[in-house]
Amino acid sequence: MLKKLILGLVALVVVVVVSGFIYVWINKSPKIFEASVAGLYHTAERPVEKGSLRQLDSGKVVGFADSYDTYAWLGIPYAKAPVGALRWKAPQAVTPWSNTLEATEYGRSCIQFSGPLSGVQGGEGRVVGNEDCLSLNIWAPKSARSSTKKLPVMYWIHGGGNDSGTGAIFQGHHLAGMKDVIVVTINYRVGMLGWFSHDAIRATASNLEDASGNFGTLDIIQGLKWVQRNISEFGGDSNNVTIFGESAGGRNVYSMLASPLAKGLFHRAIAQSGTPDTTLLTLAEDYDDNKLNSPVSGLKNSSNGLISLIFSDENPEASEAEVRQLIGATDPSLLLKKLRDVAPEKLMTMASENSTASTYIQVARVLRDGHVLPKDSTLELFKSTKNYNSVPLMLGTNRDEQKMFMARNPEYVDNLLGVFPRAKEPAYYNRVSEYVSDNWKAGAVDEPAKIITQTDAPNVYAYRFDWDELPSNFLIDLPMLIGAGHGLEISFVFGDFQGGLPLGPLLDKTNAPGRKALSLSMMDYWAAFAHKGAPGRGLSGQQPEWSRWEPSGNNIMMLDTDTDTDADGGLRMQELRTNVADIKAKLLVDDILIDQKQRCEAYANLFLHGYQSSDFWNPVEYSKLGCDAYPAGEFRNS
C-alpha cells in the first residue's frame, strides 16, 4: 500500500513538473527560443570544406559539411544592403567580392521586434536585426554537382506575419539529404521597411519598382533571380524551382503567383496556411480617419499616419490639422530624406506605441501597386490563367490554426493555480477557433482551388494537417488548448524537430514514433511535388495516393498518424469542403455566439479585417446580420 502511495506521489510530481514546463513554454516561449538561438551564429564547429567551393556570378564561396551527407552555405548576400539612400528602394545587384567568401554563418535578421521568430536574442519589445540583411542559405547533397541530372530546387519563404522571421530558423539538411533536392532559405525585408507606399516615394522614384512600395516582395523576386543565375553551380535545376512558405510565407507564395515580375522564375508552388490577400493602397497610405464602415480607411500606421507621428514629435505644439498641412507643404525629396534619416529603432518604437500590441505594429503589407502586384485581387486573377503565373499548386492549412494564438491570450485563457493554462469557456474557445480556422481553410484552400479548377490551370492539390498528439494530463489539456495549431506542420516538412520553432514541451517519447513517421511521409510528398509536380504516392512510391482537387468527391489529403485516437486517423483522401458562404450561414444561427456584438465582431474580423481576403466582405450582409449599431471599423484593432 505504501509503495503504491509513493509511486502515486512520484507520478503526481512528474505530471506537475512536466505541466510546469509546458506552462513556461506557452507563456515564455520567446525567451526560451532566444536562449536556444544563442549559438545560431556560432561558427567554431563549422570548418570550411574544400569540396564545397563554388563560383558564383559575384565571387567564390565555400561552405561546410552538414548532416545527412550535405553541404551547407549560409549567409550568402543576394542583393546590396538596402541602407541609407537605398532604404525603400528595390533591391540592387550585390557588389562582387574578390576573396573567397566563407559561408559558415547565417546572415543577420532583418529589422524586427525580438521574438520567437526573430532568430536574435533580445528582451520583449526590443528592436533587433539589421537593415543589411538580404542573404540566403543553401543545403545540397554532397553528390549533387557531380550528378548527371540536376536536382529540383525548393525555395523556402519564411513566415512571421511579414513583420518578423528569418531564413535561419529551419535547417534544410534533412530534406535536401534524404530527398535529393536543393533547399534555399532567404531573408527579406519585413514590416514597414519591407512595405511602404507614399506619394513622396513615387515622386522621387526613377523606376516603377522603386515607386511600388513592395520592397519585401521585390526582395523575394530578387532571390529567385539569384537562383536562376547561380543554382546550377550547386547542382540545382533552374528550370525546376518550387517556392514554398508558411503563414506570411504562404501569403508571399501567393504574391509570387500574382506578380508579373516573377513570371518564369519558379515552376511549382506550395502555400502552407497562406492567404491570397493583397492590400489596397488606401489602407497603406490614408490617414486613419475612422471611416467606420469602409474597407478602405487607412491603417493606424499607414505611411501618412507614421509620417504624422514623426512630424508631431518634431512639432509638439502643432494640432493634427497643422501637422498634416506641414507634411503636404514639404518637398517630396526632403520628406523622403527625413524619413530615411530616422533610425529604424525609432520608426519601430513610434509605430509600436501607436498600436494595440507592443510587438505587433499595424502596417500594410503586400500592396496592390499596379506594377509589382496587380490592382485586382488575387482571387480575381485566378479566374484566367492569362492573368497570373499558373503552375501546379499545393495548398493547405492546419485544423486548429487559431488555437496557437488563443492559448496565450488572457481573453480566452485563465491559469489554474496561477500556473496551468485552461480555456475560460471551452465551448466558446472552440467555437472562436473553429470560425477563424475554418475561414482560414476556406480563404487559403477551398475558395482559390474552386476558382482555379474551373479554368485550364495545372492541377491543384490540397491538404489539412490534423496532428494533435500533444501531452495531456489532469492539469493541462494541450490537444484541446493548441490542437493541430498554426505552424506545427513546418517541423514535419523539414524533418527538423531539434531546431526550428521552440516546440520542446510538445514533443515527448509518447508521440515520437507517430510524429517521426508522419514527418517522413510529408517530406516524401513535398519532395515528390518538387520532383514531379504532383505528390502522388510520394517520392518513394509507398504513400497513399494523393490525388488532385476535384469539384466533387475526395478532394483533400488528411495528414495525420495512424495512432491518432480520433475516429479517423492516418493519411487518407477525404471530401472536406469549407466555403465562405457556409461559414456566414452558420454565423447567422450560432447558438454560442449569442451576444449580438460578438456576432458582428466575428463577421467584421473574419471577412474585412482578418487574415484572409476582404473579397468576401459584404456591407449589406453585415447590416442584415443586425450590425448597424456596431460599425465594422470599430473592430479593426480589437
Image (cartoon, rainbow, N blue to C red):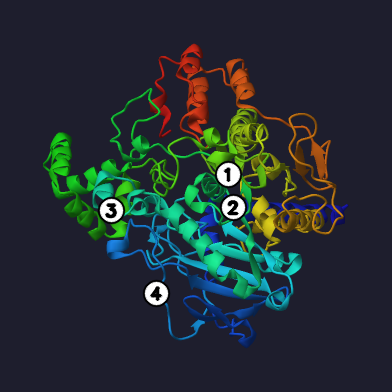
Residue under label 2: 245
Q: Is residue 475 visible?
A: no
Indicate the secondary structure of the residue bearing disc 2: strand
Number of on-image labels = 4
- Between marks 1 and 4 in the image, the one whose residue lies nearer the viewer: 4
Cα distance in 3D space between marks 2 and 3: 30 Å
The numbered mark at residue 194 is none
- Between marks 3 and 1 in the image, the one whose residue lies nearer the viewer: 3
Depth check, front residue: 374 or 100: 374
Q: Within 10 angstroms of label 2, few (less than 14), some, or many (20 or more) residues?
A: many
Marks 2/4 in contact by CB < 8 Å: the verdict is no
Give the residue type that dot 2 points to: Gly
Depth check, front residue: 414 or 573: 573
Counting from the top left corner in percent of width and height, residue 531 is at 73, 59
The numbered mark at residue 95 is 4
Residue under label 1: 274
Give the residue type that dot 3 points to: Ala
Indicate the secondary structure of the residue bearing disc 1: loop
Marks 2 and 4, the one that precedes in the sequence? 4
The numbered mark at residue 205 is 3
Cα distance in 3D space between marks 1 and 2: 8 Å
Marks 1/4 in contact by CB < 8 Å: the verdict is no
Vertical relation: 151 (above or below) 588:
below
Indicate the secondary structure of the residue bearing disc 3: loop
Compared across the picture, whether 323 is left or right of 195 comes to: left
Cα distance in 3D space between marks 1 and 4: 34 Å
Q: Quadrant of the C terminus?
A: top left
Compared across the picture, whether 591 is left or right of 321 comes to: right
Give the residue type that dot 4 points to: Thr
